[in-house]
């Protein structure tokens, strides 16, 4: 899971002209477009569960079906169980799980 930002010129409907914008991506999807001039911003709903699911599945191609069912039912337990199951570097995965949890909170809050 990765959040990146790029700066570019776009037409802002509030400024009524082309201004500098910051575009935020979560993985490959645009999650926010922000006009740096007037501050107008548009949040784009991203299904964070889907993003995490995609990522997890990519990592564990060997057992996608079993894992996905488990994942749907017990997301948190599943994330916490990842290090033991699939990875040889527990710290890295622990860090990633923490990071994913952070994104999960951030993007879940946005939905409301
Ligand atoms: Zn603007």
Image (cartoon, helix red, strand yellow):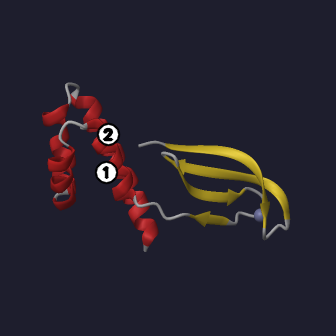
Residue under pointer 1: 53
Q: Residue 77, image x and y in percent? A: 15, 52
Residue depicted at x 21% and y 45%: 64
Using the image, determine if residue 1 lies above or below residue 86. Answer: below
Structural distance between the alpha carbons of marks 1 and 2: 8 Å
Query: Label 2 crowding class (10 Å Cα cut-off): few <14, some 14-19, many 20+?
Result: few
Q: Residue 59, image x and y in percent? A: 29, 36
- Ligand 1: which quarter? bottom right
Q: Is residue 67 left or right of residue 45?
A: left
Residue under pointer 2: 58
Q: Residue 82, image x and y in percent? A: 19, 40
The answer to whether the residue bearing label 1 lies less than 8 angstroms from the nearest atom of ligand 1 is no
Query: Label 1 crowding class (10 Å Cα cut-off): few <14, some 14-19, many 20+?
Result: some
- Quadrant of res 84: top left
Residue depicted at x 78% and y 69%: 13
Q: Residue furthest bottom?
A: 112
Q: Is residue 60 left or right of residue 19?
A: left
- Quadrant of res 108: bottom left
- What kind of element bears circle 1? helix
């Amino acid at each position: 899971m990765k959040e990146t930002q790029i700066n570019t010129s776009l037409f802002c409907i509030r400024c009524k002209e082309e201004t500098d914008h910051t575009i935020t991506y979560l993985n490959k999807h645009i999650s926010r477009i922000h006009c740096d001039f007037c501050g107008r911003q548009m949040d784009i709903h991203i299904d964070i569960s889907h993003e995490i699911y995609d990522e997890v599945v990519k990592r564990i191609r060997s057992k996608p079906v079993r894992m996905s069912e488990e994942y749907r039912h017990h997301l948190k337990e599943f994330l916490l169980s990842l290090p033991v199951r699939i990875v040889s570097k527990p710290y890295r995965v622990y860090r990633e799980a923490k990071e994913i949890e952070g994104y999960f909170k951030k993007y879940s809050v946005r939905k409301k």
